[in-house]
Image (cartoon, rainbow, N blue to C red):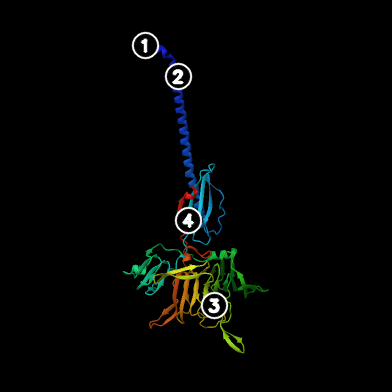
Amino acid sequence: MFKLLWQNEDGMVLPLVVVMIAVFTILGFSALFMVDTQAGLEEKEIHRTGALHYAEAGINDYLGHLNRRINVPWDKWNVPVPFEDGYYQLEQVEFDESSLTRVIQATGWVAGDEGNKRTIRAKIGRRAFNEYAYFSHDDGPNIYWKTGEVCYGPYHTNNILNISGTPTFYGPVTYSKDVIGVGNNAKKIFRAGYRMVPEIKLPNNNYQLKERALERGHYYFGRTRILLDGDRYHVKYYEEITDGRGRKTYQEQEKRNLPLPENGVIYVDGGNDGKFAATSGNLFIAGELSGNLTVGAANDIYILGYDPLENQWEKNVKQGNKTVTKKPDPVPNAATQGIVYKNTVFRQVKSGKEVTGYEADGDDMLGLVANNKIRILGEDWFDGVKADVAPNNITIHAALFSINEGFGYESYTKYKKENIILRGSLVQHTRKPVGETDWMGKKTGYYKDYAHDPRMLTTAPPNFPEPLNTGWEIKEWIVDPPEDR
């Protein structure tokens, strides 16, 4: 019977073998498929990692270009740029050449795998001197911030910050060496805190402004007088004339209604041959600005409250049947003298009744950068007269930068004035006086009414000098932003 059963099962062996072969074949193909799939997934992940690497390379290449400070525009926007075994492509998201921050986006991919891209969106920024309401490299041992004095906006000194009493700083305060005299009044004095930071290095000169002026700006050599008039300006400057014997002389020329330069830079070149010398790189400036402008001087800058194009301080003019003595016109007008913005308004910011700063509404912006000193013109005029030529109150809307000296009033010990109203930024190597009080309590010179232009936290005047030991850096970094996923 067993033999019979076995004989009856002879026909089952072949189907069983076929089934087993089929099963093993399917398992084999499945294993091969899984291996291929795994290899594909691994390759895809490798390409994703590579794509991110190439996107990072794009961001870093652009930062490197900016920090080389070669003043050549980046010309690789919106085009694939080869890098190693792949590509990156850069786009502008939020971009303004004058801004201290920019948002750019980089997309990377491996060559041959354009469908597997990665994106990085980066906010980049740079430090700027005009971020500070008040910046000084050296305050000097006898310069103190005293009770009643106020600083609206960020403050920095590369030296020692000397405190006497309880002045008020409404912006963040930084110093590089020490702070003396605070006692238990830190919270009262420093409303936004204070801390020690590394020294911020000043440039040695403003030569880069000269280069920009020679490229697409306006360049003058010798003593130059500028009257700003909205989006135009009037100028008196010197031209070098060589006669038939090879002798050089300088003749003063005048041009009116010139447009502001294409790149926003004017430069006055020359030597240090005396305040009014034809060959001195000195700028005399006043007026009203509509637009964005930086004016540099190889030597000194003088800020006036009267028309700098007038040669005589006093001249006799006919008024009907009378002859009267007339001074140069106050500029921009009798109510507000100095250098002001035409289309920008400053308003107080208050906390209760306490003024804590200023806000600005408008787009005008001015930078004045002297290799040496910046002064309010005090006693001399172009015709050699000795007289009080400074206004009682003077308004200055600008970022002032005195690279190797400081900002002051020429005649601070002689004439009693009222206020310097500065809205912008003051950057100087060494603090200089604008007024003084003698041992009897007699006050001469100006009182200070200084406040930061808050727009300068994010924007700078055209080609305004930058700290030497800082550059463009990444502030924020988003990988594969949601809208690109």
Question: Mark 2 highlights which residue?
Answer: 15
> At 59% from the left edge and 72% from the top edge, which residue is drawn?
233
Q: Which of pointers 3 and 1 lies earlier in the amino acid sequence?
A: 1
C-alpha separation, residue under disc 3 versus residue under disc 1: 128 Å
* Residue 123 badge: 4
SS at mark 1 in the image: helix
Residue type at the position of mark 4: Lys
> Given the current orientation, which residue lies at the most extreme right position?
244
Residue type at the position of mark 1: Phe
Q: Are marks 4 and 3 in contact (CB under 8 Å)?
A: no
Left or right for 184, reference 251: left
C-alpha separation, residue under disc 4 versus residue under disc 3: 43 Å
Residue type at the position of mark 3: Asn
C-alpha separation, residue under disc 1 versus residue under disc 4: 87 Å
Question: Mark 1 highlights which residue?
Answer: 2
C-alpha separation, residue under disc 4 versus residue under disc 2: 70 Å
